[in-house]
Image: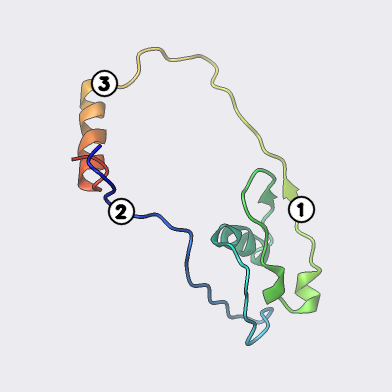
Amino acid sequence: FTGWTGTHTLNGVFIAKGPNIFHGVKLEKTNILDLTPTILKIYGIPVPEDMDGTPINDIFIDEFKERKIPVQEAKIEQPEEHDEKGLTEDEKSLIEERLRALGYIS
């Protein structure tokens, strides 16, 4: 370990515009993890029950805010058989090369 090479914060800027969005709403305590569930709600796509975050309902006009989107049950699929061989040397080298290019290892 040679020290931190970057930061990964959950801070960000959120801007929304559309026919079902209130104009001029200021959000004080919104989490970036709420972005994906919000987009799914806009498109009427079920939000997986194991997804972090919840739709940012404060941005929606009342009629849209009350729109109920079904929650999608999480499906965890188990592999039919366990592969014991692992990664090839070429795959390991490729992963290491990509991690190095991203600055995660030196």
* Within-10-Å neighbours for mark 2: few <14, some 14–19, many 20+: few
Vertical placement of 71 versus 36: above or below?
A: above
Q: Which corner quadrant of the image does residue 49 belong to?
A: top right
- Which quarter of the rendered picture does the C terminus lie within? top left
The alpha-carbon separation of the residues under discs 3 and 1 comes to 42 Å
The picture places residue 7, in percent across and down from the top left corner, at 35, 55
Vertical placement of 5 versus 11: above or below?
A: above
Q: Which corner quadrant of the image does residue 100 belong to?
A: top left
Label disc, if present, on residue 106 of the rendered structure: none
Which residue is located at x 54 percent, y 61 percent?
32
The picture places residue 101, in percent across and down from the top left corner, at 20, 46
Marks 2 & 1, CB-CB < 8 Å contact: no
Nearer mark to the viewer, of 2 and 1: 2
* Within-10-Å neighbours for mark 3: few <14, some 14–19, many 20+: few
Nearer-N-terminus badge (3/1): 1
Can you identify the residue that label 2 sits on?
6
- Which quarter of the rendered picture does the N terminus lie within? top left
The scheme the figure's colours follow is rainbow
Q: Which corner quadrant of the image does residue 92 belong to?
A: top left
Which residue is located at x 63 percent, y 55 percent?
53
Can you identify the residue that label 1 sits on?
70
The alpha-carbon separation of the residues under discs 2 and 3 comes to 29 Å
> Of 72 and 2, which appears nearest the observer?
2
Callout 1: SS: loop
Say which amino acid is labelled 1: Pro
Nearer-N-terminus badge (2/1): 2
Task: Please indicate whether residue 39 sits to the left or right of residue 12 in the image.
Answer: right
Say which amino acid is labelled 2: Gly
Label disc, if present, on residue 88 of the rendered structure: 3
Which residue is located at x 79 percent, y 77 percent?
62
The picture places residue 59, in percent across and down from the top left corner, at 67, 75
The picture places residue 42, in percent across and down from the top left corner, at 65, 67
